[in-house]
Image (cartoon, rainbow, N blue to C red):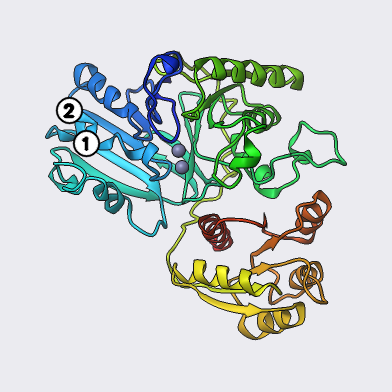
Amino acid sequence: MKLRFWGTRGSIATPGPTTNRFGGNTSCVELVTKSGRRFIFDCGTGVRLLGMHMMANAPKPIEATILITHTHWDHIQGFPFFAPVFVPGGRFTVCGPSGTHDSLPDTLSGQMEYTYFPVRLGDLGAWIEYKELPEGDHTLGDVRVITQMLNHPANTLGYRIEADGVSVMYVCDHEPYWEGLWRADVAPGHLDSILHAGDRRHAEFLLNADVVIHDSQYTPEEYPSKKNWGHSTYRYVTEIAAAAKVKHLFLTHHDPAHDDAFLSRMEEQARAIAQASGSGLQVSCAYEGCEMTIEGDGSGHAPADQFRAGATLSNRQHLILIADDDEDLRILVRKTLTRGGNLILEAAGGHQAMELIKSRNPDLVLLDLLMPSPSGFEVLRWIRETAESRDIPVVVLTAQGDEVSVRTCFELGATDYLVKPFTAPQLDVRVRSSLARARR
Ligand SMILES: [Zn+2]
Ligand SMILES: [Zn+2]
């Protein structure tokens, strides 16, 4: 497979003399298989240059599969400037995450209304098909495409492409579920020592990949003031890629405030972490124009049964119980989740929560830990020990940010663990992911 970076910047394009080396265009990566099938990851401003390149060099009529991670601006803003979609005869399949409040074509056409752009989406010359992909294992032509929902305050898919004996992954945008990553009571560096179940699932997604292109917008020093914005640090990405036995990691989605000199230092620091891990992981900062031919022997392909198919994020109405003694928190949850059409039950303590679970059988429980007796820990244990409620997804929502509480909750069978304060879109995505996975 052939890989080429056309946009490596996150958030907003930053052209200029201080970003010449790593590039100023936003997210766009091209992947071409040996059989000539072309994939385009994201349509940030970099896709304009790719479009010009394809007009001059690609076989006609031009065909490609466009894999959109999510519809934040830096991942779609170049789409109206991608020249091949204006040419009659061209064929494009545009894929993106399922279950967003607006459909993929609705969102793309929103940024092409006459207020913003002179040509409507429906007036483009090429034939364009839209596919909303659930989390799981898919086949597109002769290529395996595995998708997984990421931790970002918007419905976001990571992609794992397997073809030609090689696996290449594109993982933007993603934030650690637990920044420290490791549990303190087990030696770090392997999957069993990852504390949060979300990070472990992420590492399993990356496992043995030949190439991983990953959001690493921040330094560990910057992260505390950027928490909940949905991005990783180079340290988290390098450590988790090393533990997952990834062969080559590309750091990307560079912060607009990081100039070339800053990114070179980040690359050195990430390489030092990779070297210290002893895993053999290679690390590079992605730069615009970077090209690579990837050869493999299939050892990086995931086992056929590793990724279950079909967790569709749906907009159907769910019954959700919020158990928390903090009334303000219950109001925030109700406001956030009723917007998506859900019905909300409220409990101010453990006893009331257990009564409501027995009588109303909710689709999901949001559970505080430090409630009046019985505590959230005891309620969680009871949910998992009771036949009728054993399979209900339980998302812990708590101020308890200590490692022992996280570990205890996952041992008791929590589905997810979210530390307060969190943002409304984060809560929405985490609840929808948990509901989708529970239905498989
Ligand atoms: Zn982004
Ligand atoms: Zn984003």
Q: Quadrant of residue 314?
A: bottom left
- Distance (Cα) linking label 1 and label 2: 7 Å
Residue 77, image x, y percentages: 31, 38
Give how far across and how far down residue 93 sits, in percent. 29, 40
The one nearer the camera, 311 or 290, is 290
User: Which corner quadrant holds the C terminus?
Assistant: bottom right
Q: Which label is found at residue 58? A: none
Neighbours of disc 2 within 10 Å: few (<14), some (14-19), many (20+): few
Mark toward the start of the polypeptide (1 vs 2): 2
Q: Residues within 10 Å of mark 1 (few under 14, many from 20)?
A: some
- The residue located at (26%, 50%) in the rendering is 110
- Residue 61: which numbered mark, if any? 2
Give whichever of 305, 117 is nearer the camera. 117
Q: Which residue is labeled 1 in the image?
A: 91
Q: Is residue 358 left or right of residue 412?
A: left
Decide which of 348, 60 is in the foreground and name it: 348
User: Image quadrant of residue 59?
Assistant: top left
Q: Amino acid at mark 1?
A: Arg
